[in-house]
Image: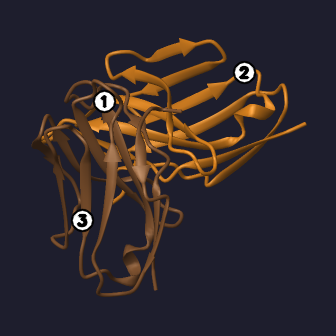
Chain colours: A brown, B orange
């Protein structure tokens, strides 16, 4: 158990809909990262927040947005969903902002868009 | 544009033998590399890392080798154990712009008894 929690575990929705994925980092960690893993692909970095502020941005679509709240939990919002958005979404956390540090991953949310 | 590549989707090794997982990168702006291991239905967990100023880092049964001129790194597991069966991801820290971690596609390692 990494100490990072993600809800829900599974999500099935239809094209055009909007969903929110939630992540609670390990106690004391200030950074939260979001990754997308599509079938047979590696983890694609989406976005990082550090202590409430956006720190780094990866290949995140404009239809996707994220935020980190004062209690440090984070939410990833996916809107106008398409079939290709079906994937595993992982959240990770780390104490600092640097990508040199080990990141601790949650178990992921599996999103299926029908 | 896959900047970190793991060209072997799968690898099968006999228990007790050496497992060698390979990773290539294309961008010289990577300055730190990490290996993560992932079991089904779990998130990846950190295994071992190496700075670009080193060519080897060892931790128990796990050793990572870095060849900067070839832009290649490898993870050696000796001896391989059944519990090592998992998907292994290579990742590099890219220092172009804001730091971010770039992952390879993963290699599924199966250790056979």
Taking the image as drawn, is residue B71 in sight? no
Q: Residue at x 81, y 27 (%)?
A: B17
SS type, badge 1: strand
Name the residue beneath numbered marker 2. B78
Disc number for residue A107: none
Rendered image quadrant of residue B91: top left
Q: Residues within 10 Å of mark 2 (few under 14, many from 20)?
A: some
Write down the residue under mark 1.
A94
Question: Vertically, is B110 above or below B61?
Answer: below
Which chain is indicated by disc 2? B
Residue in the image at 46% along x and 86% along y:
A114
**Picture coordinates of residue B9, whole percent (x, y):** 61, 55
Picture coordinates of residue A84, whole percent (x, y): 39, 78
For marks 3 and 2, give the one nearer the viewer.
Answer: 3
Q: In this rendering, which labeled residue sits more in front, label 1 or label 3?
A: 3
Q: Quadrant of residue B51?
A: top left
């Amino acid at each position: 158990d990494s100490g990072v929690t993600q809800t829900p575990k599974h999500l099935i929705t239809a094209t055009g809909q909007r969903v929110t994925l939630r992540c609670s980092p390990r106690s004391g960690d200030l950074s939260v990262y979001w990754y997308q893993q599509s079938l047979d692909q590696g983890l694609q970095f989406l976005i990082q927040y550090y202590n409430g502020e956006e720190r780094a941005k990866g290949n995140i679509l404009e239809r996707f947005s994220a935020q980190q709240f004062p209690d440090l939990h984070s939410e990833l919002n996916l809107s106008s969903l398409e079939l290709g958005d079906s994937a595993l979404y992982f959240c990770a956390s780390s104490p600092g902002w640097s990508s040199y540090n080990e990141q601790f991953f949650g178990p992921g949310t599996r999103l299926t868009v029908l | 544009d896959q900047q970190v590549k793991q060209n072997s989707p799968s690898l099968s090794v006999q228990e007790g033998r050496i497992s060698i997982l390979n990773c290539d990168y294309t961008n010289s702006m990577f300055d730190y590399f990490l290996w993560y291991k992932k079991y089904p239905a779990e998130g990846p967990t950190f295994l071992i890392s190496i700075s670009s100023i080193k060519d080897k880092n060892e931790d128990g049964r796990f050793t990572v080798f870095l060849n900067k001129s070839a832009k290649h790194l490898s993870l050696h597991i000796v001896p391989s154990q059944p519990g090592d069966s998992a998907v292994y991801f290579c990742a590099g820290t890219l220092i172009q712009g804001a730091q971010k971690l770039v992952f390879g596609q993963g290699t599924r390692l199966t250790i056979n008894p």
